[in-house]
Every structure is written in C-alpha cells, then in structure tokens.
Amino acid sequence: MSLRRARMLFKTIPKSQYRHFRFYDEDLDLGASLNLGVIFGNDSFIPKEAMVNLGTLVRGEWNKFVAQIGFVQQNTENLIEKLLGHQGLLVDKSFEQLITRGRRALADTQTSGYLRTLFQKVRD
C-alpha cells in the first residue's frame, strides 16, 4: 500500500496520546503501573515517538523504571515512499529478487581465475 493511499484512509492525522494503567492488590501488597505514550507530528500519520514504561510496587518498595522501551524516528515516511511509492525501488522486484544477491560480473571471474592459478601453484 502506498503512502498516498494510506493518507487517503487517514483523513486527519492521529492525535498524540498518553495512557496510564495501574493495578494494586492490597492483600498481596503488590502493584504495577504501565504508561504508554505516542507522539505524532503535524505532517505524518507515522508516530514520531512512542514509549512504554513499567513500574512496580513490591512490599511497599516502588521500582519506578522496571522496564522501559521506546523509539524515535525522523523522515521514515520519506524512506517508505522512496522504497514502496509509485516509482519506488522495490515496486517491480519480486520477493526472490529482494532476498537473493545477483552474480558479480567482472569481480567474480577475476577472483575465481586468481584462486584457480593459486590452487594450481600450490598443487604443483
């Protein structure tokens, strides 16, 4: 799917969002806090930044950053457009062409010729 089509599907750019989820069990004296955040730019429907943060409460001790993961990106939309767009680099290539490497024309013959002569010299 091209980015032009995706832009048509997303008539408005998604808004940045923040969510906070918490859990606490008084009997076990155990709790957790999960924070999710996504920041969108004004010109793209791909998020500029996303972050997930987990904190825990175990026996009265607060561990604020047990796990934290996130990403920040710039100009990913331009890269995707160049690869998958109307005249992108990957448009006319099959899956096999993408994952396999073609033979080298000149360098391969020179290398194999050099290795043959070296092998013959060692053998003699």
Image (cartoon, grey):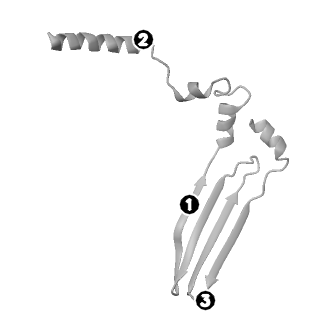
Residue behind mark 2: 106
- Residue 120 horizontal/vertical position (percent): 20, 10
Residue behind mark 3: 26
Residue behind mark 1: 69
Under circle 2, the secondary element is helix
Locate residue 28 relative to residue 106 in the image: left or right.
Answer: right
The first of marks 2 and 1 along the sequence is 1
Please, which residue is most extreme toward the left here?
124
Determine the CA span between mark 2 and mark 1. 46 Å
Residue type marked 2: Leu
Quarter of the figure with residue 28: bottom right
Locate residue 70 relative to residue 20 in the image: left or right.
Answer: left
Residue at 84% of width from left, 41% of height from top? 8
Residue at 64% of width from left, 27% of height from top? 89
Q: Quadrant of the C terminus?
A: top left
Determine the CA span between mark 3 and mark 1. 28 Å
Residue 11 - label: none
Task: Give the foreground label among 2 and 3.
Answer: 3
Q: For this rendering, which residue is in front, 40 or 122?
A: 122
Locate residue 93 relative to residue 57 in the image: left or right.
Answer: right
- Residue 107 horizontal/vertical position (percent): 40, 15
- Residue 35 horizontal/vertical position (percent): 64, 69
Locate residue 11 relative to residue 50 in the image: left or right.
Answer: right
